[in-house]
Image (cartoon, grey):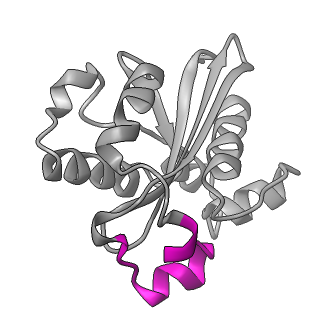
Amino acid sequence: MKTSFTAIDFETATRHHICSVGIVTFENGEIIDEYHALIKPPNNEYNWHNIQVHGITQRHTQNVPSFNEIYPEIKKRIHGKTLVAHNESFDRNVLTKTMRDYSIEYSDLNISEKWVCTMKIYKAKGYKPANLNACCQKNNIQLEHHQALSDARACGKLFLIA
């Protein structure tokens, strides 16, 4: 079992426009770095459904940097790392589409095409449901659901005990 990896989570303002990122770096099973940022989505536009999920609104992101301004901090933390996400396909697609919007090459990150997916791991263990909240409750992992840093931290802890 790999105990050095980076867990990541995105919250979105619209379909794939990021409004929040949480990144937690684990070395030898211990958290060595945590990063969280609010990100201004294009035109600071939000879908009301997304706001219902995470509570982030235009007011929270009107004066924060956009993705391309935050990207160097993200790259610094995930470049060349093994990435873990709870719904890997969602988070990976959000990142790749956002990078494409800003003409940033995904290959610059030197990371795998597919990431490790803790939801798939827990589904294979027979968890029903296998969403982040249910997995954390069952394993007594603290979670402020849909807060990107908390989600990333919890995902990393789930991966360690899987």
In the displayed image of the protein, which residue is found farthest to the top? 28
Q: Is residue 77 visible?
A: yes
Q: Where 124 sits versus 70, above or below?
A: below
In the displayed image of the protein, which residue is found farthest to the front? 63
Of the pair 101 and 59, the residue shown nearer to us = 59
Using residue 93 as the reference point, say whether residue 49 is left or right of it.
Answer: right
**Quadrant of the image for the C terminus?**
top right
Q: Residue at x 50, y 36 (%)?
A: 84
Using residue 139 as the reference point, say whether residue 59 is left or right of it.
Answer: left
Q: Where 117 sits versus 40, above or below?
A: above
Using residue 108 as the reference point, say whether residue 14 is left or right of it.
Answer: right
Specify the quadrant of the image occupied by residue 121. Answer: top right
What percent of the width, then of the height, locates residue 161?
74, 33
**Quadrant of the image for the N terminus?**
top right
Using residue 42 as the reference point, say whether residue 149 is left or right of it.
Answer: right
Magenta-tinted stretch: 44-60
Q: Residue at x 54, y 27 (%)?
A: 6
What percent of the width, then of the height, locates residue 58?
49, 75
Q: Is residue 57 visible?
A: no
Predominant secondary structure, magenta span: helix
Specify the quadrant of the image occupied by residue 94. Answer: bottom left
Q: Residue at x 45, y 54 (%)?
A: 39
